[in-house]
């Protein structure tokens, strides 16, 4: 099936048209500055990028621009939208309502709307993308794929917070986790590499999605049993600009000193913290590596903090699962930083982790980077969330 994958943000919209079976990407692109002026960058493999400034006051105009780009006689890859079989949407928060992807109908939209308080920045934008597609391609089946769904197999002791239970009962306050589509893709691919995709019982995998946004997950028997992000994506590991786990007392303390209101405080924790906050240099790990190489002590500290927290979580999840068979690194940092991968696994020899430094240093794409004698296999597996969305869309549309 040819599936159009949509990832709508508040002022941007990413898209890919791809084959759900082979994974071939026919074209992909980005609409940006929605609500400001509008620009589309359309990419087709083997051709020059096509960039055009198009007024995009709303997501309707952005989707219209995507359709025009895909069907354009010179730049397009299909003659008409009739060649597109279905549309898959990334939706951030599914709350407790969704344990799997679903066909989009009125009930699905109502449930996504109900989750807006849990995902106030992302869910409204995701809905704008869905409604724009409904308006401009009303005959196409659409599927919602939730970042949180894969993590809904966590046991109560992993997802419950140690606050009054009534907040869970009345307000759905619990650990949800994010990057679920990525964790699902790389854990399934890891099971294939282990030869256990048909029989995942007894397998124990730690997946590390590391980039500007970072999270780890514990995958036991092919199912998620714990993850680092929480009610929202601010929790867990320190990230590019997000603080990760901190003592809540810090919030009250700083608000008292500086007179911040809660919006100002959350803006600091979301956009001015993480490795940017520690280093004062950048949220980009490449910039940090360059600064650390030149002797910048705070950049070095930021990287050391990040590596330490990832390593600590790997150990925690090994303990929680009673062992680990494989560790998987993915996303921008996980796939592209051999130095950080080496530091994150250094000291885990007691668990049976032996990194092959040569393989790690020369890794490009999917590869086993542990030694032959390593009791724990260490993989780099490039993530492909768009393919996971396309596969889910094809599956549900086919079933429907």
Image: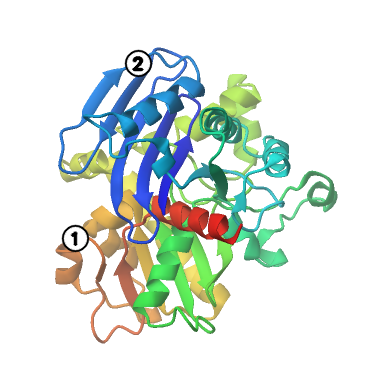
Q: Earlier in the sequence, mark 2 or mark 1?
A: 2
Residue 146 appears in the rendering: yes
Using the rendered image of the protein, determine whether residue 234 is visible from the camera's viewpoint: no
What SS does tag 1 mark?
A: loop
Circle 1 residue = 364
Asked if residue 135 is positioned above or below residue 362 in the image, the reply reads above
- Counting from the top left corner in percent of width and height, residue 324 is at 45, 78
Q: Residue at x 60, y 37 (%)?
A: 250
Left or right side of 8 for 344 = left
Image location of residue 83, percent across then percent down: 39, 43
Towards the viewer: 275 or 120: 120
Question: Which residue does the image show at 54% across and 78% down from the upper left?
Answer: 221
Q: Which quadrant of the figure contains the N terminus?
A: bottom left
Task: Return the residue nearer the eye: 317 or 45.
Answer: 45
Task: Report which quarter residue 122 is drawn in.
Answer: top right
Q: Is residue 216 above or below residue 198?
A: above
The quadrant holding residue 54 is top left
Mark 2 or mark 1, whichever is nearer to me: 2
User: Where residue 107 sits in the image (x, y, percent)?
Assistant: 73, 43
Q: Position of residue 256 (x, y in %)?
A: 65, 25
Image quadrant holding the C terminus, namely bottom right
Mark 2 highlights which residue? 54
Badge 2 element: loop
């Amino acid at each position: 099936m040819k599936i159009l994958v949509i990832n709508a943000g508040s002022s941007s919209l990413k898209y890919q048209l791809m084959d759900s079976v082979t994974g071939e990407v026919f074209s992909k692109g980005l609409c940006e500055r929605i609500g400001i002026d509008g620009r589309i960058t359309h990419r087709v493999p083997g051709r020059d990028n096509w960039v055009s400034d198009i007024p995009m006051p709303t997501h309707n105009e952005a989707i219209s621009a995507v359709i025009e780009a895909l069907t354009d006689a010179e730049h397009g890859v299909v003659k008409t939208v009739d060649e597109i079989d279905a549309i898959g949407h990334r939706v951030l928060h599914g709350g407790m309502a969704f344990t799997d992807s679903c066909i989009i109908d009125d009930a699905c939209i109502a449930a996504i709307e109900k989750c807006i308080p849990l995902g106030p920045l992302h869910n409204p934008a995701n809905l704008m993308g869905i409604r724009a597609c409904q308006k401009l391609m009303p005959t196409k089946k659409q599927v919602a794929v939730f970042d949180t769904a894969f993590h809904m197999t966590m046991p109560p002791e992993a997802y419950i917070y140690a606050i009054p239970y009534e907040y869970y009962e009345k307000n759905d306050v619990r650990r949800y986790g994010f990057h679920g589509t990525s964790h699902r893709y790389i854990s399934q691919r890891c099971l294939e590499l282990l030869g256990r995709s048909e029989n995942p019982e007894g397998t124990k995998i730690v997946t590390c999605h590391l980039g500007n946004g970072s999270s780890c997950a514990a995958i036991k028997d092919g199912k998620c049993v714990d993850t680092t992000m929480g009610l929202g994506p601010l929790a867990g590991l320190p990230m590019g600009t997000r603080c990760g786990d901190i003592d809540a007392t810090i919030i009250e303390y700083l608000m008292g000193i500086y007179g911040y209101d809660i919006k100002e405080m959350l803006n600091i924790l979301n956009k001015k913290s993480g490795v940017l906050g520690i280093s004062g240099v950048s949220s980009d790990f490449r910039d940090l590596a360059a600064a650390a190489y030149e002797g910048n002590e705070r950049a070095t500290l930021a990287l050391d903090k990040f590596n330490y927290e990832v390593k600590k979580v790997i150990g925690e999840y090994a303990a929680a699962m009673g062992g680990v068979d494989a560790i998987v690194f993915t996303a921008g940092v996980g796939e592209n930083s051999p130095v950080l991968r080496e530091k994150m696994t250094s000291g885990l020899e007691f668990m049976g982790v032996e990194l092959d430094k040569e393989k790690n240093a020369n890794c490009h794409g999917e590869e086993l980077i542990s030694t032959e004698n390593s009791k724990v296999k260490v993989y780099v597996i490039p993530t492909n969330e768009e393919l996971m969305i396309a596969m889910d869309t094809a599956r549900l549309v086919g079933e429907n």
